[in-house]
Image (spheres, helix red, strand yellow):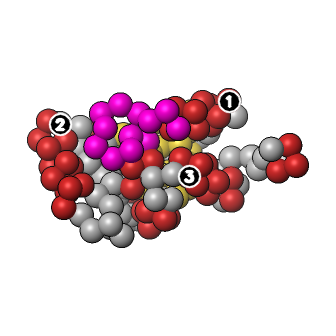
Amino acid sequence: MALTLYILYNADASIMGKLNYGYRKLTAAKDQPACAACDITHGGLRLDETKEWKAIKQTIANEGVEIKQLHRDELSDELKKFVTDNELKYPVVLSGDGSSDLRVAIGSEELGACKGDAEAFIGKLRERGVLKRVNESFL
């Protein structure tokens, strides 16, 4: 079965969730983003995905990896249980092949270290072997 990346946002999809996120984003300290995954995929307070994220997402898809971007209130029971059982903080990126073999691909603090940079995000996935390494001589 193909690998799936689950990007789990530290926000809810509802209107109130979006308003709450906006407030947290505007009042959060710079070193503690309201949702580092949101910063990577949407550039913060935008409703649409950034051009950079769309390009990275296509690169990941070209490697045969499916991406599911989910808010806290959109998680399946299996994903909720994994997050709870492992005492994970949102946002977090999980990976799995759909047969209950979930694992943490990138934790919350590591997402924050990306500082909203989609290239840094894909670099971390490659470092961890979640995605194939690119031969740097071809770059």
Residue 40: mark: none
Chief secondary structure of the magenta span?
loop
**What residue is shown with label 2?**
14
Marks 2,3: beta carbons within 8 A: no
> Magenta segment range?
41-52
Residue 98 lies left or right of residue 43; in this view the side is: right
Q: Nearer the viewer, mark 2 or mark 3?
A: 3
Residue 62: mark: 1
Q: Is residue 37 above or below residue 65?
A: below
CA distance for labels 2 and 3: 26 Å
The type of residue carrying mark 1 is Asn
Q: Quick one: which residue is furthest to the right in this view?
A: 137
Residue 121: mark: 3
What kind of element bears circle 3?
helix
- State the image coordinates of residue 35 (x, y, percent, origin top left): 33, 54
**63 drawn magenta:** no
What kind of element bears circle 1?
helix
Among the 4 quarters of the image, the one containing residue 75: top left
Q: Which quadrant holds the C terminus? A: top right
Q: Residues within 10 Å of mark 2 (few under 14, many from 20)?
A: few
